[in-house]
């Protein structure tokens, strides 16, 4: 992750090519360079492990050949990166038998390395993380994200955003789900919700939140599943209140 961060920062100075995967879904050559670097490193060190990553994988449903799978996003926050906004990171998790056991997320602009190991806690640059103690939505700072097909789901997405805005102290939108989760773990945000996510967006961050004492579920309150594409992450204290807002909001389609 540190090497990916170095590459991201270096290419901000030298320039890079930007392409489109969809109408508003961008990919840069830095995404691809970081992923190729990570794949080569993992293949050298763990040649029999599976790899699932954003740019060069066939998708979350690709067959497994090993108990061990590395799940990573070489550049989370690509749109921010492409526009010169310093909110982006690299994210990596190791799954064993389908469950994340180790995770790391590196923000090179702030030189913050977030990490977590199941049963061993979560840390940023070696300092233990702990979720906030906020007990009510009215006192909570929340964060969310919007999917790349936001133009097709604008009305229900804005309805839910408005529902939270009407009950929380404030709602933010940073553009990096991995950092959103890290900030919940660090107590900077009290809660996060988003739909249409991918495993590489959340595998590491969800583990870090749990190890910092937080709670993760699906948006319907179900057990968290990184393949299910939706989640609510919180300090635990406001979790049921957040699920209540989602239940009362107009259904997303």
Image (tube, rainbow, N blue to C red):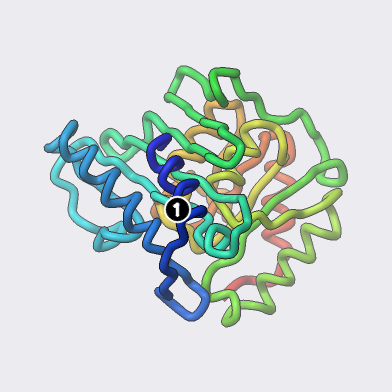
| Residue extending farthest front | 14
Give the total number of marks visible in the rendering: 1
Q: In the rendered view, tell whether residue 86 sits above or below residue 78.
A: above
Question: Residue at image x 61%, y 37%?
Answer: 110
Residue 41 percent coordinates (x, y): 23, 38
The N terminus - image quarter: top left
- Determine whether the residue tagged by mark 1 lies in a helix, strand or loop: helix
Tag 1: Cα neighbours inside 10 Å, few (<14), some, or many (≥20)? few
Q: In the rendered view, tell whether residue 232 sits above or below residue 60.
A: above
| Front residue of this view, candidates 41 and 175 | 41
Question: Residue at image x 24%, y 63%?
Answer: 58
Question: Residue at image x 55%, y 61%?
Answer: 195
The C terminus - image quarter: bottom right
Q: In the rendered view, tell whether residue 169 sits above or below residue 252.
A: above
Residue 165 percent coordinates (x, y): 81, 59
> Does residue 130 appear left or right of residue 69 in this picture?
right
Question: Residue at image x 38%, y 37%?
Answer: 3
Residue 181 percent coordinates (x, y): 58, 42
| Front residue of this view, candidates 34 and 56 | 34
> Does residue 89 appear left or right of residue 84 in this picture?
left
| Front residue of this view, candidates 120 and 84 | 84
Residue 246 percent coordinates (x, y): 68, 59
Residue topped by disc 1: 11
| Front residue of this view, candidates 103 and 125 | 125
> Does residue 149 appear left or right of residue 20 in this picture?
right
In which quarter of the view is residue 101 placed? top left
């Amino acid at each position: 992750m540190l090497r990916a961060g170095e590459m991201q920062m270096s290419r901000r100075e030298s320039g890079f090519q930007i392409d489109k995967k969809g109408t508003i879904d961008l990919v840069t050559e830095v995404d691809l360079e970081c992923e190729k670097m990570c794949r080569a490193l993992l293949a050298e060190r763990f040649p029999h492990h599976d790899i699932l990553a954003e740019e060069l994988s066939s998708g979350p449903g690709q067959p497994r050949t090993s108990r061990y799978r590395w799940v990573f996003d070489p550049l989370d926050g690509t749109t921010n990166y492409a526009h010169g906004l310093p909110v982006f990171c690299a994210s990596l998790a190791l799954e064993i038998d389908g469950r994340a056991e180790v995770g790391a997320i590196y923000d090179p602009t702030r030189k913050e390395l977030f990490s977590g190991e199941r049963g061993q806690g979560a840390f940023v640059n070696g300092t233990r993380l702990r979720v906030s103690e906020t007990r009510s939505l009215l006192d909570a700072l929340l964060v969310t994200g919007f999917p790349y097909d936001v133009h097709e789901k604008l009305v229900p997405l804005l309805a839910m955003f408005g529902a939270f805005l009407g009950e929380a102290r404030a709602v933010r939108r940073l553009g990096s789900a991995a950092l959103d989760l890290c900030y919940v773990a660090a107590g900077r945000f009290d809660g996060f919700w988003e739909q249409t996510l991918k495993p590489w967006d959340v595998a590491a961050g969800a583990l870090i939140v749990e190890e910092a004492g937080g709670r993760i579920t699906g948006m319907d309150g179900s057990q968290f599943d990184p393949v299910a594409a939706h989640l609510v992450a919180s300090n635990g204290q406001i979790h049921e209140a957040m699920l209540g807002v989602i239940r009362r909001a107009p259904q997303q389609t």
